[in-house]
Image (cartoon, rainbow, N blue to C red):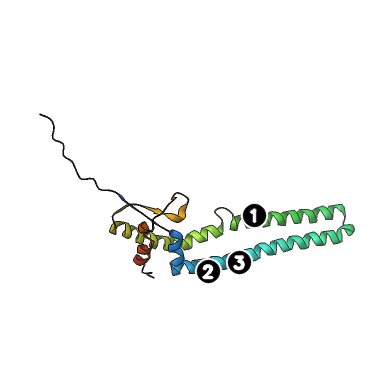
Amino acid sequence: MGALTILKPVQAQKFGYIDSEFLLNKHPDYKLVQKELAALSEQWKKEAQKLEQDIKEMRSNLKAEEVLLTEEMYRERLLAIQEKEKQAIAFNNRVFGINGQYYQKQAELLQPLQSKIFDAIDKVCKRFNLAVLFDKASGPLMIYTDPRHDYSEFVLQELGLEK
């Protein structure tokens, strides 16, 4: 006698996508984050511009007084200018470089909002029994998207931000 094969029904896995950029831009907290980041960025840019202006003034003063300076005094001023340039580069790297203060602050400010959105996404996926949910804004992985499978509006509803 052969073994009895029991066939189980196969369920198709459901897929969908969202547009995280769309969701962020619709959330009022995102505008507050952007405002705060813009204010910080402006403040840091002014500091960087002040350093650059100081360097220009130092160079201009050196050029104007060059004939009056001894060789040693000239070298000292040139070294001071070079030190100020190093400070300007270090400041820009510390603030705007990879993992700089700007990006750290951005991550800190966005984290609570991203958590809210992720929680809403989790609820929507469970409600619609989605196996996979793609993010349309995260890269060119999706060549075609059918609007029927866009769950962004459901996530907005879950966040309490209906149209």
Q: Nearer the viewer, mark 3 or mark 1?
A: 3
Q: Residues within 10 Å of mark 2 (few under 14, many from 20)?
A: few
- Quarter holding the C terminus is bottom left
Please identify the residue farthest to the right as the structure is shown.
67
What element does badge 1 sit on?
Answer: helix
Contact? badges 1 and 2 (CB < 8 Å): no
x and y, in percent, of residue 73 in the image: 83, 55
Left or right: where does residue 44 sit relative to residue 127?
A: right
- The amino acid type of the residue labelled 2 equals Lys
Marks 3 and 1 sit apart, C-alpha to C-alpha, by: 18 Å
At 28% from the left and 59% from the top, the residue drawn is 127
Disc sitting over residue 48 in the figure: none
Q: Earlier in the sequence, mark 1 or mark 2?
A: 2
- Quarter holding the N terminus is top left
What element does badge 3 sit on?
Answer: helix
- The amino acid type of the residue labelled 1 equals Ala
Left or right: where does residue 125 sit relative to residue 88?
A: left
Question: According to the image, label 3 marks what residue?
Answer: 42
Place residue 94 in its image quadrant: bottom right
Q: Is residue 8 above or below residue 130?
A: above
- The amino acid type of the residue labelled 3 equals Glu
Q: Earlier in the sequence, mark 3 or mark 1?
A: 3
Marks 1 and 2 sit apart, C-alpha to C-alpha, by: 26 Å
At 77% from the left and 63% from the top, the residue drawn is 57
Question: According to the image, label 2 marks what residue?
Answer: 35
What element does badge 2 sit on?
Answer: helix
Question: According to the image, label 1 marks what residue?
Answer: 90
Marks 3 and 2 sit apart, C-alpha to C-alpha, by: 11 Å
Left or right: where does residue 157 sit relative to residue 70?
A: left
x and y, in percent, of residue 112 in the image: 42, 63
Contact? badges 3 and 2 (CB < 8 Å): no
